[in-house]
Amino acid sequence: MSDLLERLRGRGWRMTAQRRVVAEVLDGDHVHLTADEVHARAVERLPEISRATVYNTLGEMVTLGEVMEVATDGRAKRYDPNAHRPHQHLVCGRCGAIRDVHPAGNPLADLPDTERFGFTISDVEVTYRGICPNCATTA
């Protein structure tokens, strides 16, 4: 069973066939699919699943905190099932590919008090940008 499925079951989330398929499609490392990509893959496993069901299920998973929405550079939102593993993202500026990265250090602790301007910091999002190897070879 996938990590995401285990987490959802642990929360007592009712596991319908449609919800299970969406969770299975999102399973894995470096998974950052758009809702349409999730739907296309879900249809391969469960042909009757609707786009609305996929969108609603993704929204519920985000609300539960089990999946993160990742938005980069005005592109379609992507869904990251690694919500419980602290990480940052590396994004290709050409094709939009996203990889999870785990830099050393703690970006929350690295912000000096003089740069917090009285804020109580609760979260940090760092996005590294570059060109992926596939796009670099086709340049």
Image (spheres, helix red, strand yellow):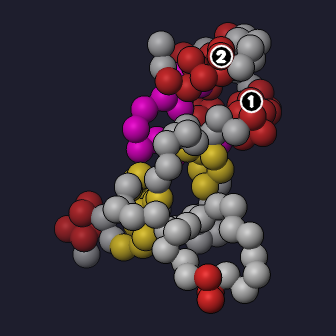
Q: Which residue is mark 1?
A: 57
In percent of width and height, residue 57 lies at: 74, 30
Residue most toward the bottom? 114
Q: Which residue is mark 2?
A: 10
Can residue 94 be seen at all in this image of the molecule? no
Specify the quadrant that holds the C terminus: bottom left
* Mark 1 or mark 2, earlier in chain: 2
Spatial CA span between label 1 and label 2? 17 Å
Residue 85 highlighted magenta (yes or no): no
Between tags 1 and 2, which lies in front? 2
Amino acid under disc 2: Gly
Residue visible at 56% across and 26% down?
4
Q: For mark 2, does the 10 Å Cα neighbourhood hold few (<14), some (14 to 19), or many (20 or more) residues?
A: few
Amino acid under disc 1: Thr
Residue most toward the left? 137
In percent of width and height, residue 46 lies at: 61, 15
Q: Which residues are magenta?
A: 23-37
Residue visible at 65% across and 50% down?
69
Q: For mark 1, does the 10 Å Cα neighbourhood hold few (<14), some (14 to 19), or many (20 or more) residues?
A: some
In percent of width and height, residue 127 lies at: 49, 68
Residue visible at 78% across and 39% down?
63
Q: Is residue 14 above or below residue 79?
A: above
In percent of width and height, residue 81 lies at: 55, 37
Q: Is residue 116 left or right of residue 104?
A: right
Disc number for residue 21: none
Element type where label 1 sits in the image: helix
Q: In the figure, residue 36 lies in which quadrant?
A: top right
Q: Nearer the viewer, residue 5 or 57?
A: 5
Q: In the figure, residue 114 lies in which quadrant?
A: bottom right
Element type where label 2 sits in the image: helix
